[in-house]
Amino acid sequence: TERVQAGLERIAESRQAENTETLAARLPYFCAGCPHNTSTKLPEGSQAASGIGCHVMAGGMDRETGGYAQMGGEGVPHVVASKFNGGKHLFQNLGEGTWYHSGSLAIRQAVAAGTNITYKILYNDAVAMTGGQHNEGDLDAYRIVEELKAMGVKNLAVVYDQKEDVDLSRFKGVEIHERAEMPNVQKAYRKHKGVSAIIYIQT
């Protein structure tokens, strides 16, 4: 109506009078020392998707990271899209906090559908998006690996920062790599058929 239009025009005029920029000039970015600085980087020619969590910011960076899904739906859009794009591979970022309450369900669906996808599961031992509190249920990287194996994920790699207190002997039948090897691990894993997973440990 005319009254609504007039009101919108008054709001627009008041904003102009403030002499402020319409959009923020600075894009959000990961905190200094954040594990996502390493874990969301991709080898050239790869693509990734984000979800609900700090890693969604990779979509605004030069990291070939696209759309996202709701918690518990990470990778589900690709499960559908892969039926129409020739089964292309995708990396899907997922935090261990989301894994614990719903993200593991999405992985089960991807396994059932035979989707070519590699889940990059960040284990940082914190729910960083909401204040850095300890994750629920005493979840650890060892349990994540065992649960992935139980789901039928055959190709699994653990990538860890050397400063972490990690008992490598507890990762039975799993590839182990140091942080510097992450680019090469991803290059190898994008060639795997079906669901694979890289558990990236950096607290």
Image: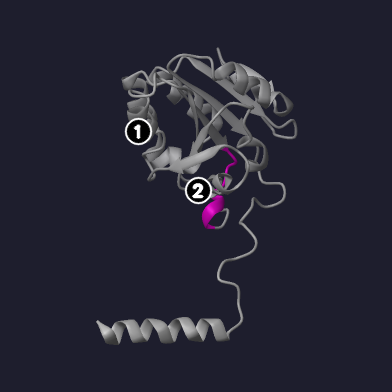
> Which mark is on residue 53?
2
Task: Indicate which disc residue 33 carries.
Answer: none
Residue 193 spot, x, y in % from top left: 45, 14
Residue located at (39% from left, 19% from top): 86
Residue type of the residue flagged with mark 1: Leu
Q: Secondary structure at mark 2?
A: loop
**In the image as oriented, which residue stretches furthest toward the left?**
1
Give how far across and how far down residue 3 sits, in percent.
28, 87
Q: Describe residue 169's horizontal placement relative to residue 163 as left or right.
A: left
Foreground residue among 35 and 61: 61
Segment tinted magenta in the rendering: 123-130
- Mark 1 crowd level (few <14, some 14–19, many ≥20, 10 Å Cα): some
Q: Is residue 93 visible?
A: no
Instruction: Name the residue rendered at 61%, 38% in the picture.
Output: 63
Where's the C terminus, which quadrant?
top right
Q: Is residue 189 above or below residue 12?
A: above
**Quick one: SS at disc 1?**
helix
Q: Is residue 72 above or below residue 116?
A: below
Residue at 58%, 44% (x, y): give it.
58
What's the residue type where badge 2 is placed? Gly
Q: Is residue 192 magenta?
A: no
Which mark is in front, 2 or 1? 2
Q: Earlier in the sequence, mark 2 or mark 1?
A: 2
Q: Quadrant of residue 161?
A: top right
Left or right? Give the position of 75 relative to 50.
Answer: left
**Mark number, residue 105:** 1
Q: Nearer the viewer, residue 187 or 160?
A: 187
Circle 2 residues within 10 Å: few <14, some 14–19, many ≥20: some
| Relative image position of residue 150 (x, y in whole percent) | 40, 19
> How far is the residue under mark 2 from the one under mark 1?
17 Å
